[in-house]
Image (tube, rainbow, N blue to C red):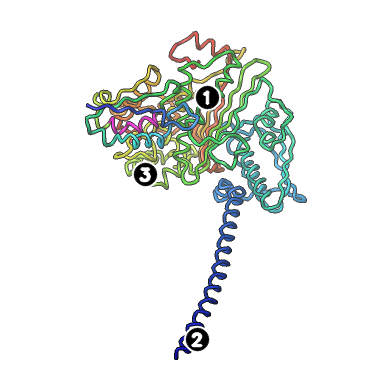
Amino acid sequence: MSKKIIKLGNYRGKGSKIFSGRPDGERARKDSRLDKYDIEDVKFIIEIPEDTISLNSSFFLQMFGKSVRRLGETEFRAKYEFVTEDKFILASIDDGIKRALKTKSVLG
Amino acid sequence: MRNYRRRRLKRKRYLEGITSEVYRIRNKTKKSEVRKKAKNIKQTTCRKSLVKSQLLGFIKDSEFNKKCRTNIEGGKAYILIPEVFSFIENPDETLRTLQKILFLSLKKGVNELFLDHSRCKVLHICASIITDIILVSAKKQRKHQGKKLVIKGKLSSIQKIREILVVSGIINHLGLNDEVECNNNIKKLDLICGDNYFVRLGRVIKNSGGAATKIIEYFKKCLNTQGFELVREGENYLGEMIGEVIANCEDHSGEYGEWYSIGHYSIDEHNGCGEFTLTILNFGQTIYEGLKYDIISEKLKKDLTEMSNLQRGFLGLGDWNEENLWTLYALQDGVSRKKHEGDYPDRGSGTIKLIHNFQNIGYINNQDNTSEKPLMSITSGNTHILFNDEYSLKTEKIDGEERQVIAFNKENNLKIPPDSKNVKRLQNYFPGTIISMKSFLDREYLESRMGGNDEQKNN
C-alpha cells in the first residue's frame, strides 16, 4: 500500500487559521485526486497545521464527504490518517464523518 | 516594344510605390486609432470600476429601491433616524429609513442629506453599516459624475450612540474622525469585505476563513477587557460559528454576492459589562429567492411545498407567508438549496452551527436578578427571524437519525405554526441576508459559568 501526504495548510485562505468553505474543500479534493485514489490501494496522511483554529464541516464535507460515503466510516478511518493532537479538531472530524453519513430530512 | 514594356513596368512600380505608401500611411493611422480606442476603453473601464459600484447598481434594481415621500428644499433633504434603529429590535422601520436614505442619495435634485440622530435611543451596528455603505457608494458615484453629495447630521445625546457613529459609523466612514481617539472602553472591528470598492472603509479579505480569523482575534481583545482569555475550546467554537456563516454568505448569495462584516464593543461605565455586537451580511439573493427560483432538488422542493401547505390554514392568522416559512425551514439541520441526493447529500450544516453556538454566548446578571440576554436576528427579503432565549435548538430523532431543529413553538415541531413574535413577515424588503448579533461579556457571568458545568464553558 503506498502512502501519500496531504498538507492541508495549502488549502487555507490567505491569513486564515480556519478551514472553511466548500470551494476550498473542493479545491483540496481535486488537487489531491481523491476521487481516483479512493478506489486504489493508497493511504493518506493528512497533516493539519498546529495553529489551526477550526476545521469546519463545510470544508471537511466537501473534501472528504464523498470518500466517507463511498468507503464507509471504518474503511475511511483506515485509509485517511489525520495527524493532529488537537482534540477539538479530532472532534470536528468525528462530527464531519457522522454528518456525511446522514440521509434523513427534517422536512419530510 | 521594349520601351513600352519598360514604361509599363516603371509605371507599375511607380503605382505600387504610391499604393504601398498609401497603405503604410493608412495602416499607420489605423493602428494609432486602434491603440487610441483601446486606451480609451481601458481608461473608461478603470473609471467605471471606480465609479460604478456594482452594489449600488444591484440595490437600485431590487425591491429595496422604493419611491419615498420626502421633504426637499433647495436641494437639501432631511432624514429622521428612528428611535430604535436596529434590525434586531425594529426591522421594518429600520428598513423604511434605509430605503429613504437610498432614494434620496440617488435623487438628482438632492445635493445635501441631513441625518438627524437626535431622537435615536437604540442604534445597532447592523443598521448603521447599511447606512454607511449606501452613503459612501452614492458619494463616490456623484464625485465621478462631477457632482457633490454633502452629508450632514445631528448626533444623538446618548453617549453609546455617539460612540458607535464616531468610532464605527458614518463619522468614521466619511473620514471625519481623525482627531477622535478610540478610548480603552471601545474596541472596533473595521469593516471586512470581499469588495475592492470599499477598500478605504476597512480591509478586503477575500476568503471566509481569513475573515473569521480576524473576527476571532477581535473577540479575544474584547474578552481581555473583562480579564479573560479565550481558551482553545472557545476558539474552536467561534471558528466554527463565524467561519460557517461567512462561507454560507459566499455560497448562497447568487450572482451578485458580496459579504461584509463589522463589529463594535463598548464597556458600560456603570456596571463594567461589555456589549458586543457583530454583523455579517451579504447583498444578493435572499434565502427564499435561492430556494424558489434556483434549480433545487425535486425532493427538497416537494418537502418545502408540502410543509408550507400544512400551514396554509394558519397563514392569515400568524401573518407569515410562504417566504417566511421557507426561510425558517432553510435554517434547519440538513436543509440547503444546494443539497442534491446524488452529488451533495451532506449540505445544510452552516446556519445550524451558528444558532447552536450563539445560544451559549454570554448574558449579564444584573443586580436586580434580571439578566440581559443575547439576541440574534436573521433578516432576509421580507422575513425576520429573532433568536432569543424563549426557543432553542433541540436534537430530534428523525427515523433513528439525530438532527437539530428549531421550530419556534413549544412542541418544537415544524408542522405547527411558529410563534409570530419570532418569525415575522416584514412590510419592507432587504436585498440579501443580514445576521445581527448582540451579546454581553460580563465578568461575573463568565466566572459563574466557569465554576459551573464544564460542558457549557465558552471561555
Give the residue type that dot 3 points to: Ile
Of badges 3 and 1, the one in the foreground is 1
* Residue B209 percent across, percent down from the top left: 47, 30
Secondary element at tag 1: helix
Give the residue type that dot 1 points to: Ile
Label 3 and label 1: CA atoms lie apart by 34 Å
Above or below, A17 relative to B176: above
Above or below, B152 relative to A3: below
Whichever of labels 2 and 3 marks the residue nearer the N terminus, that label is 2
Secondary element at tag 3: loop
Label 3 belongs to which residue?
B296
In the image, A17 versus B142, the foreground residue is: A17
* Disc sitting over residue B216 in the figure: 1
The extreme top residue here reads B451
Label 2 belongs to which residue?
B7
User: Horizontal placement of B67 versus A25: left or right?
Assistant: right
Whichever of labels 2 and 1 marks the residue nearer the N terminus, that label is 2
Q: Can I make out residue A106 in this image?
A: no
* Residue B113 percent across, percent down from the top left: 72, 44
* Disc sitting over residue B420 in the figure: none
In the image, A83 versus B13, the foreground residue is: B13
Label 3 CA crowd tier, 10 Å (few <14, some 14–19, many 20+): some
Residue that appears at 55% across and 64% down: B31
Q: Chain of mark 3?
A: B
Q: Can I make out residue B235 in this image?
A: yes
Whichever of labels 3 and 1 marks the residue nearer the N terminus, that label is 1
Q: In the image, which residues are magenta?
A: A57-68
